[in-house]
Amino acid sequence: MTHRVFFLNKLRPGVDPADYEAWIRRTDYPVARSCAAILSYDVTRIEGTLDGEGTPSVNYLEVIEVTDIEEYRAAGKTPEFVALLEEWATYVELDEALHGDVIE
């Protein structure tokens, strides 16, 4: 069964999206994608609502396909991931972290 983790992220006030996206490419992707518990990982910039009304509540969506949620949680406690999350928190003000099984 495929299991996915989702992060809905809002940037901190004053954070330049270009700086955050450069950090994703330079640091986040290489570290996360080298983790054995992560099968795939992509970040999407949210550009608007589908109906074109209002402003989205988040700026970015992260989609991570994992081997197992407990293995992924354990990987998040390694020194490399702790350092990654500390850097990430300098960019992201608010996030909602969700996970679940894909209905196949």
Image: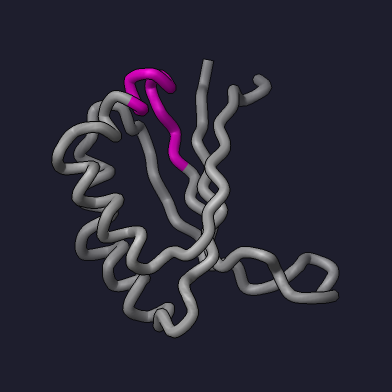
Residue 79 locus on image (x, y percent): 14, 39
Residue 22 locus on image (x, y percent): 29, 72
User: What residue span does the magenta drawing correspond to?
Assistant: 64-73
Q: Which residue does the image show at 48% across and 51% down from the upper left?
A: 62
Residue 61 vs 52, above or below: the answer is: above
Residue 68 locus on image (x, y percent): 40, 19
Q: Quadrant of residue 40?
A: top left
Q: Nearer the viewer, residue 32 or 85?
A: 85
Residue 5 locus on image (x, y percent): 50, 36
Q: Quadrant of residue 87?
A: bottom left
Using residue 84 as the reference point, say whether residue 39 is left or right of it. Answer: right
Residue 41 vs 23, above or below: the answer is: above
Using residue 13 as the reference point, say whether residue 81 is left or right of it. Answer: left
**Number of numbered labels in the structure image:** 0
Q: Quadrant of the C terminus?
A: top right
Q: Quadrant of residue 82?
A: top left
Q: Which residue does the image show at 45% across and 56% down from the upper left?
A: 43
Q: Nearer the viewer, residue 54 or 96?
A: 96
Q: Which residue does the image show at 30% across and 50% down from the upper left?
A: 85
Magenta stretch containing residue 102, yes or no?
Answer: no
Q: Which residue does the image show at 27% across and 44% down from the upper left?
A: 32
Residue 14 vs 64, above or below: the answer is: below
